[in-house]
Image (spheres, rainbow, N blue to C red):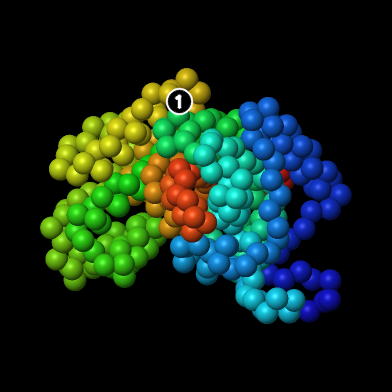
């Protein structure tokens, strides 16, 4: 192997590619600043306790090593959101706060969202507001970000992990079975779900099966309200999606619903969303609500946000 060859999944930008990236970075930061989002630049490394929080997925993707200066285990950030939670907990405990960032991250392996192990994660997060108005605000900003990058038309996929959570809670499943079910839904594996339901006697087995396939236009909202009429937590989650759709109908973006959508990171607790374009094979940007992620820092805060790989999107034509 030549000494100039980069490690697998690691890439760089030079020449015109670097200039295109920098131009888009500046435009995005101008947009976020005008919308009231404060720029933050989290450190490359932190103590692992701050980086990992409660997410096994983040843990798995985080490079860790022993710090010779402190003797503590530290890690390279694989996801910016846990760092924003720490920053918010330290500075804005009792008010609404808005943050934006464009930072390189490093992951031990590429996932189904990022195209490399070294994406440059751009995003925005809003803390301190539990109302769906906050979700609408960050979704609108996500749409505006992609349009600024000349990506049109867009399809917005909406879901709510609270429906899955309500079903799991109703079954009183232990953490291992919950993790297995979550992994099955994340992989969209209908055969694996069938096997799981055969091996575990669940009173709502039919609802889990229906949830796996519950996607489409706004008609699935009415279908979901009937299907989960006996689960109060699920009913509220579905009504939230209805309200969000009503507020986004004027944004010239096609909206679809996907109730089986569970994000890569387990910290999402409510509305989740992704943006697609017909010229790309997977989501271009994604996000959702993650109330409580900051509890590890002493206070639970409502939060919602989105992110995307600016390095990848800046190179598209």
Numbered circles on residues, count = 1
Residue occupying the point 52% across, 49% down: 282
Residue occupying the point 55% across, 67% down: 49
Residue occupying the point 79% across, 53% down: 13
The correct choice, above or below, for 249 with respect to 19 in the image is above
Q: In the rendering, at what x and y percent does residue 114 appear?
A: 59, 55
Q: In the rendering, at what x and y percent does residue 215 appear?
A: 32, 42
SS for callout 1 = helix
The correct choice, above or below, for 174 with respect to 90 in the image is below
The correct choice, above or below, for 278 with respect to 34 in the image is below
In the picture, measured across the screen, residue 36 lies left or right of residue 160, that is right
The correct choice, above or below, for 126 with respect to 247 in the image is below
Q: In the rendering, at what x and y percent does residue 142 appear?
A: 57, 36
Task: Return the residue nearer the eye: 240 or 249.
Answer: 240
Quarter of the image containing the C terminus? Answer: top right
Residue of label 1 = 248
Quadrant hosting residue 123: top right
Is residue 134 in view from this perspective?
yes
Task: Return the residue nearer the eye: 278 or 297.
Answer: 297
Residue occupying the point 48% across, 43% down: 303
Is residue 114 in view from this perspective?
no
Task: Return the residue nearer the eye: 89 or 129.
Answer: 89
In the picture, measured across the screen, residue 210 lies left or right of residue 100, that is left
In the picture, measured across the screen, residue 238 lies left or right of residue 197, that is right
In the picture, measured across the screen, residue 305 lies left or right of residue 203, that is right
Query: Of all residues shown, which one is farthest toward the right?
Result: 15
Give the crowd class for mark 1: few <14, some 14-19, many >=20 residues within 10 Å: some
Query: Of all residues shown, which one is farthest toward the top?
Result: 250
Quarter of the image containing the N terminus? Answer: bottom right
Task: Return the residue nearer the eye: 220 or 127.
Answer: 127
């Amino acid at each position: 192997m030549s000494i100039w060859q980069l490690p697998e999944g690691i890439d760089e930008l030079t020449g015109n590619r670097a200039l295109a990236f920098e131009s888009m970075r500046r435009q995005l930061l101008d947009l976020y600043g005008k919308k009231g989002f404060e720029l933050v630049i989290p450190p490359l490394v932190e103590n692992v306790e701050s980086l990992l929080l409660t997410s096994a997925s983040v843990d798995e993707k985080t490079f860790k090593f022993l710090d010779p200066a402190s003797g503590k285990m530290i890690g390279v950030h694989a996801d910016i959101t846990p760092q924003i939670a720490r920053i918010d907990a330290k500075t804005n405990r009792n008010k609404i706060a808005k943050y934006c960032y464009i930072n390189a991250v490093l992951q031990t392996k590429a996932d189904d969202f990022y195209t490399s192990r070294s994406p440059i994660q751009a995003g925005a997060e809003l803390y301190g507001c539990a109302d769906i108005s906050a979700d609408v605000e960050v979704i609108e900003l996500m749409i505006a970000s992609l349009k600024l990058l000349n990506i049109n038309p867009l399809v917005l996929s909406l879901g709510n992990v609270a429906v899955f959570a309500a079903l799991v809670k109703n079954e009183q499943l232990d953490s291992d079975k919950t993790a297995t079910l979550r992994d099955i839904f994340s992989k969209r594996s209908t055969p694996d779900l069938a096997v799981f339901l055969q091996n575990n006697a669940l009173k709502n087995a039919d609802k889990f099966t229906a949830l796996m396939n519950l996607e489409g236009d706004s008609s699935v909202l009415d279908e979901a309200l009937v299907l989960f009429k006996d689960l109060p937590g699920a009913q509220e989650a579905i009504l939230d999606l209805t309200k969000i759709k009503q507020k986004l109908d004027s944004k010239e973006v096609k909206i679809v619903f996907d109730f089986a959508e569970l994000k890569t990171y387990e910290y999402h607790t409510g509305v989740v969303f992704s943006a697609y374009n017909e010229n790309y094979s997977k989501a271009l940007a994604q996000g959702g609500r993650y109330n409580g992620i900051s509890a590890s820092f002493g206070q639970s805060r409502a939060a919602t946000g989105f992110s995307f790989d600016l390095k990848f999107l800046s190179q598209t034509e």
